[in-house]
Image (cartoon, helix red, strand yellow):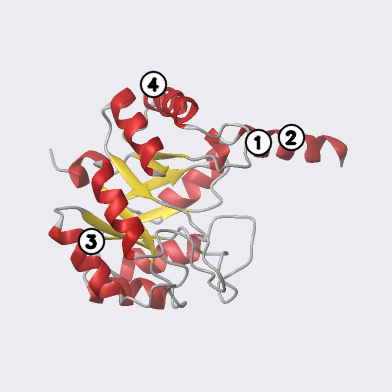
Amino acid sequence: MSILNIIKGRLIVSCQALENEPLHGPDIMRKMAKAAKEGGAVAIRANGVLDIIAIKEETQLPVIGLIKRDYPKCEVYITPTIKEIDDLISSGCEIIAMDATNRCHPDHVSLIEKVNRIHQANRLAMADISTIEEALQAQALGFDIVSTTLSGYTPYSPQQDAPDVELIGKCVKALTIPVIAEGRIFSVEDIKAVKAQNPFAIVVGSAITRPQLITKRFADAYSE
């Protein structure tokens, strides 16, 4: 089966922990991904070559790979340069996710050049976007998939705690390529609201795999 057939209409779980987070490290992420698989996830979104390799060894699930890396004077941090793309190609992930917002990339390489590099390696290119305009641009540039990951993470997109259901719906209606719904999906009710927009698949991350944030939500509610 192709990766798109595997993920269509199913749940993808994002298993990520940055260096300053308690669960950081490939040994922990591989177990987190295994737990997600046992719960019904059909693919994993993962950050970093070592995590991706460990997760694929542990689960044999397809992986949406990305590398978060900060560069000076640049807001783009999800697979920001060609170097990260080449590293992800070496990891064996099937899909490479990258920031496709209308912000300056640190290597000043065009998005279309980056998409071409991904396609030359026989991988699918996923555009993480924050607005419908960015989604349409990504489709025109040849991206295979659009994800609403960055809504709320650009200053010009809605700043809200809930999923951007409106953006998901607009993308589904306007695009001919698959639309992945992602971002601030914290509950079963959120899943139902997002699913009603008929996305190709749904990614859930922090609500499943970042226990420090899960705990904080309960602690904050308890102290109100």
Find disc 1 in the rendering and name its residue: 214
Q: CA distance from mark 1 to mark 4?
A: 20 Å
Between circles 3 and 2, the one closer to the viewer is: 3
Q: Nearer the viewer, residue 165 or 209?
A: 209
Q: CA distance from mark 3 to mark 2?
A: 37 Å
N-terminal-most mark, 2 or 4? 4
Q: Which mark is residue 144?
A: 3
Q: CA distance from mark 3 to mark 1?
A: 32 Å
Q: Amino acid at mark 1?
A: Ile
Residues at discs 1 and 4 in contact (Cβ within 8 Å): no
Q: Amino acid at mark 4?
A: Glu
Q: CA distance from mark 2 to mark 4?
A: 25 Å
N-terminal-most mark, 3 or 2? 3
Please state the horizontal and vertical placement of residue 59, each as a whole percent of the image.
31, 25
Please tell me which residue is depicted at 37% across the width and 26% down the height of the picture.
37
Name the side, left or right, on which 103 lies relative to 114. right
Q: In this orientation, does residue 8 appear?
A: no
Please tell me which residue is depicted at 33% across the width and 46% down the height of the picture.
64
Q: Which mark is residue 38?
A: 4
The N terminus: image quadrant = top left
N-terminal-most mark, 1 or 4? 4
Find disc 2 in the rendering and name its residue: 218
Residues at discs 1 and 2 in contact (Cβ within 8 Å): yes
Query: Quick one: which residue is furthest to the right in this view?
Result: 223
Which element carries disc 3, helix, strand or loop? loop
Name the side, left or right, on which 48 lies relative to 1. right
